[in-house]
């Protein structure tokens, strides 16, 4: 990873630091005693359901909101009292907020004009930005003459024109259709890597966060639940909320039965046979502990024939209740003989008419001990 | 609405428009009449226009009217903008409903009452009535009109535009002059034009608040009609109708452009 350590292995100086920040609106607490470091060069995502405080956090970096307690530091400097127009931070708004009475060029040049750039330098910078977002041919258009995707590009160019230390992106792709959104996500990542800037994105879309971000902070109720790389968030969620919020999941209550072997053995409320789970180093369970087992649907295999037994394989028989076909994959809802419902996702490697499985089929599910992780609550 | 207009619709439309515009049409037509009688057509002529343009009293009244209209609309638009911004932007401050009600009240108040109360005020304060008292009176009414027009524009104004400007380094003043004002300017322009036309054709308030030497065109018209209708008045009225119609058309056009652009 490009962070959070510097080249010599020392911890890098954070670019943005939230130090025990609390934000209250009247009696409502939007942010509760939150501390967070964001390092230079990161593509950092603030992810959470609406009302979790992620937008408030972003607006505090921009300077639109002040902390009720604690401090926000930019490059080690306390930002309290520094207004938004004096911060080397720019924001791309959810609505894009393009000035409707100005052409694309004038929109991009707006920030430069405020800083008193001369004509020639402004011209050059605007041209540079236009080619960065491939909008050279539409420089003279007004925003209402552009498509949604084009507006998004202009908004991006405008917020990058002043070479901010941090670019804030507030749900930047929400207004685009799915295909364009996916393309744009890759373009954003590419842009961020080429420019070497720090991007902070606010989103409620976990797929978007995982696609673009190098690190994700999952928020709920004004607090940070987990700050980690995307794969860690997905595969090693810190708690049941994150496991459920990020992606689809099967979750079962388990009781640890045996910790002596290489694998944990546990009883689960719906199964007759014990489940084996490969423990994580930080788990530290003892016999009798209660926990939740988290199993992603794509990590479960579904077959008609009973699979060969092995010490690190869990298996359970069941019956297909529901199949949802989404093109690339199919999701099966399987009622286990023990009564539990398990979600299984398989890639559609064959054409649909060649598929062996159908509604009501008796099937076997199996998953490896290493595919399961546990969370405490 | 689709399909053909039924005959009953066509008839009611024709009758309605005739009711509205036939009198005006007759007035306009007879302003080009050659004869002295207002009701007998004798031939086409522009002589009454020429006479109006040589009538110093009429011209002075017209000049008064235009100056009063321009001054009062300008003041009304400035004050109306502040009122609209306060109403739309300041959130729920104490007494907001009362404030809004008091801003909009002159619109629904009978003009006779507005005129009379202003007259009583000027008398009580011992202010010499004349040109400036009419300006003040018209500003009062136009202020309400402007505030309504501008507030309706501000309600649909995306606040993130101002935040974006501020975020890009603009001061509050630069944000207002470079972003807010240009975006609401069509509303400001149409508020000004509506105020101007209102002021142009107001008789009642002006009659209450005028003094010697500050006769406006509608007052002049009204007093001359009492002495008998002369074709000169038709000519003058036609000019007045044209000016007012032009003002309203421009206001509508500005509004139309604004809708198209956003």
Image (cartoon, coloured by chain):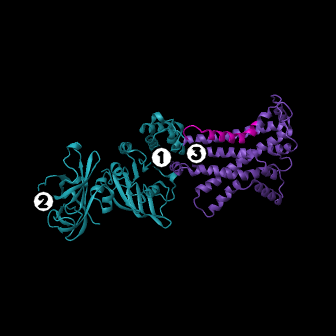
Chain colours: A cyan, B purple
Residue lying furthest bottom in this view? Answer: A288
Residue at screen point 16% across, 58% down: A315
Q: Nearer the viewer, residue B225 or B78?
A: B225
Residue lying furthest right in this view? Answer: B227
- As for residue B19 lying within the magenta part, the answer is yes
**Height in image: A131 above or below A328?**
above
Where residue B161 appears, x then y in whole percent? 53, 48
Give a yes or no on whether discs 2 and 1 share a subunit: yes
* Residues rendered magenta in the picture: B1-25
Where residue B18 appears, x then y in whole percent? 71, 39
* Residues packed near mark 1 inside 10 Å, few (<14), some (14 to 19) or many (20 plus): many
Residue B183 numbered mark, or none:
3
Where residue A308 appears, x then y in whole percent? 11, 55
Q: Nearer the viewer, residue A327 or A251?
A: A327
Element at badge 2? loop
Residue A260 can be seen in this image: yes
Could you tell whether B58 is left or right of B16 in the image?
Answer: right
Residue B50: quadrant of the picture: top right
Mark 3–mark 2 Cα distance, whole angstroms, equals: 71 Å
Q: Nearer the viewer, residue A104 or A330?
A: A330
Looking at the rendered image, the quarter that the N terminus of chain B falls into is top right
Mark 1–mark 3 Cα distance, whole angstroms, equals: 16 Å
Where residue B236 appears, x then y in whole percent? 80, 38
Could you tell whether A35 is left or right of A63 in the image?
Answer: left
* Residues packed near mark 2 inside 10 Å, few (<14), some (14 to 19) or many (20 plus): few
Give a yes or no on whether discs 1 and 3 share a subunit: no
Residue A311 numbered mark, or none:
2
Residue B250 can be seen in this image: no
Element at badge 1? loop
- As for residue A340 lying within the magenta part, the answer is no
Residue tagged by mark 1? A96
């Amino acid at each position: 990873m490009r962070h959070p350590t510097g080249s010599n292995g020392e911890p890098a100086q954070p670019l943005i630091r939230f130090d025990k920040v609390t934000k209250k609106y009247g009696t409502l607490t939007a942010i509760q005693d939150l501390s967070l470091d964001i390092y230079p060069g990161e593509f950092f995502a603030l992810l959470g359901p609406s009302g979790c405080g992620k937008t408030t956090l972003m607006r505090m970096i921009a300077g639109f909101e002040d902390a009720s307690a604690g401090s926000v530091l930019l490059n080690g400097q306390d930002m309290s009292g520094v207004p938004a127009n004096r911060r080397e931070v720019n924001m791309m708004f959810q609505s894009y907020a393009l000035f409707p009475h100005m052409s694309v060029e004038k929109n991009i040049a707006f920030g430069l004009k405020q800083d008193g750039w001369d004509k020639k330098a402004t011209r050059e910078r605007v041209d540079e930005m236009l080619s960065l977002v491939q909008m050279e041919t539409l420089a003279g258009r007004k925003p209402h003459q552009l498509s949604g995707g084009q507006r998004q590009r202009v908004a991006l160019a405008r917020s990058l024109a002043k070479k901010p230390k941090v670019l804030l992106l507030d749900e930047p792709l929400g207004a685009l259709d799915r295909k364009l959104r996916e393309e744009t996500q890759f373009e954003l990542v590419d842009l961020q890597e080429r420019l070497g800037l720090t991007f902070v994105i606010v989103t409620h879309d976990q797929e978007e966060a995982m696609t673009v971000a190098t690190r994700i902070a999952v928020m709920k109720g004004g607090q940070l639940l987990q700050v980690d790389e995307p794969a860690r968030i997905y595969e090693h969620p810190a708690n049941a909320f994150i496991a459920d919020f990020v992606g689809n999941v099967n979750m079962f209550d388990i009781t640890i039965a045996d910790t002596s072997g290489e694998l944990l053995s546990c009883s689960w409320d719906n199964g007759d046979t014990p489940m084996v789970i490969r423990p994580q180093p930080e788990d530290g369970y003892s016999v009798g502990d209660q926990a939740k087992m988290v199993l992603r649907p794509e990590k479960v295999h579904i077959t008609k024939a009973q699979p060969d037994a092995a010490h690190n394989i869990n298996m359970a028989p069941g019956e297909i209740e529901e199949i949802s076909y989404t093109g690339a994959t199919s999701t099966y809802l399987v009622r286990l003989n023990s009564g539990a419902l398990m979600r299984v996702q398989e890639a559609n490697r064959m054409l649909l008419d060649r598929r062996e499985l159908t509604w009501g089929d008796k099937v076997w599910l199996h998953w490896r001990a290493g595919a399961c992780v546990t969370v405490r609550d | 609405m689709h399909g053909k207009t039924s005959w009953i619709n066509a008839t009611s439309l024709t009758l309605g428009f005739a009711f509205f515009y036939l009198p005006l049409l007759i007035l306009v037509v007879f302003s080009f009449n050659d004869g002295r009688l207002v009701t007998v057509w004798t031939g086409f002529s522009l002589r009454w226009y020429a006479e109006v343009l040589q009538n110093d009293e009429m011209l002075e009244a017209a000049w008064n009217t235009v100056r009063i209209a321009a001054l009062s609309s300008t003041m009304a638009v400035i004050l109306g903008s502040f009122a609209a911004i306060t109403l739309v932007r300041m959130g729920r401050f104490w007494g907001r409903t009362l404030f809004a009600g008091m801003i909009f009240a002159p619109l629904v108040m009978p003009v006779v009452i507005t005129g009379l109360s202003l007259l009583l005020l000027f008398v009580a304060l011992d202010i010499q009535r004349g040109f400036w008292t009419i300006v003040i009176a018209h500003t009062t009414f136009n202020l309400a009109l402007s505030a309504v027009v501008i507030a309706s524009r501000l309600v649909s104004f995306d606040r993130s535009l101002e935040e974006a400007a501020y975020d890009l380094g603009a001061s509050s003043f630069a944000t207002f002059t470079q972003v807010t004002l240009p975006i609401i300017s069509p509303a400001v322009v149409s508020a000004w034009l509506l105020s101007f036309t209102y002021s142009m054709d107001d008789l009642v308030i002006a009659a209450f608040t005028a003094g010697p030497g500050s006769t406006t065109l509608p007052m002049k018209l009204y007093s001359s009609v009492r002495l008998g209708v002369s074709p000169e008045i038709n000519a003058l009225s036609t000019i007045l109708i044209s000016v007012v119609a032009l003002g309203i058309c421009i206001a509508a056009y500005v509004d139309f452009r604004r809708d198209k652009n956003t």
